[in-house]
Image (cartoon, rainbow, N blue to C red):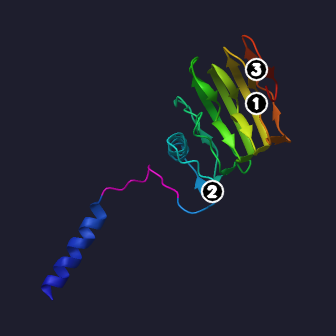
């Protein structure tokens, strides 16, 4: 009896003091998975850029997220596009800042391939090289819907837009608006899409 009690107490002690890894997130299944913190958002960016496209997996923003003080690295990169679904549910991601004149594929997302991003409000300050948009660098075979972008977006190369840098084959954009100040030194530029 004493041994059982001692084992139970030891197990409870170890469970209470075991390190908790609440900031790291690994999503399994198709979701929808909740994105409720800066940590969740940066983890998603890291995982997609690292090669997990989350094809067919759904994510939902659970609240507004302020990225003040974060040097943003986009969700995905050339060769590692996001292929899931992201519903902002009308919430705002504010103070998204990228200041890297050599970065291509810049925005909240890098490339979108077969992905849907919708119902999102963004406040951005982005300076990058090319393929630059508030929501995504480009969309191919997917859609961007009901998104609003404000702030400043500039590129020192071409293909820059307030919402998306470029709409490629099979890509669509619906009911989006941008009041962002968009500029480039040369090339394709648009208030909504480059």
Residue 170 location (% of width, % of height): 80, 42
Q: What's the residue at 64%, 24% (across, down)?
A: 126
- Residue 97 seen from this side: yes
Q: Are marks 3 and 1 in contact (CB under 8 Å)?
A: no
Q: What's the residue at 43%, 53% (across, down)?
A: 22
Q: In whole angstroms, how far apart are the C-alphas of marks 2 and 1? A: 23 Å
* Quarter of the picture holding the C terminus: top right
Please tell me the numbered disc located at residue 166. 1
Total of numbered circles in the picture? 3
Please tell me the numbered disc located at residue 57. 2
Give the SS element for disc 3.
strand
List the residue tagged with mark 3.
182
With 39 as the anchor, is 58 left or right in this view? right
Q: What's the residue at 62%, 41% (across, down)?
A: 81
Near-viewer residue (126 or 69): 126
Q: In whole angstroms, how far apart are the C-alphas of marks 3 and 1? A: 14 Å
């Amino acid at each position: 009896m004493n041994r059982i009690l001692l084992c139970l107490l030891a197990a409870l002690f170890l469970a209470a003091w075991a390190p908790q890894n609440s900031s790291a997130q690994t999503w399994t299944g198709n979701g929808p998975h909740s994105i409720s913190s800066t940590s969740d958002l940066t983890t998603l960016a890291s995982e997609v850029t690292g090669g997990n496209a989350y094809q067919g997996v759904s994510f939902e923003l659970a609240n507004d997220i302020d990225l003040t003080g974060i040097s943003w690295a986009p969700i995905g990169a050339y060769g590692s596009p996001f292929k899931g679904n992201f519903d902002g549910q009308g919430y705002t991601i504010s103070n998204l800042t990228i200041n890297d004149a050599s970065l291509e594929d810049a925005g909240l997302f890098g490339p979108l391939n077969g992905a849907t991003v919708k119902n999102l409000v963004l406040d951005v300050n982005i300076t990058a090289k090319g393929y630059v948009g508030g929501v995504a660098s480009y969309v191919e075979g997917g859609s961007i819907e009901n998104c609003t972008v404000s702030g400043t977006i500039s590129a020192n190369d071409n293909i820059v837009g307030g919402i998306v840098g470029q709409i490629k084959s099979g890509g669509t954009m619906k009911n989006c608006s941008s009041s962002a100040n968009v500029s480039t030194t040369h090339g394709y530029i648009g208030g909504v899409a480059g």
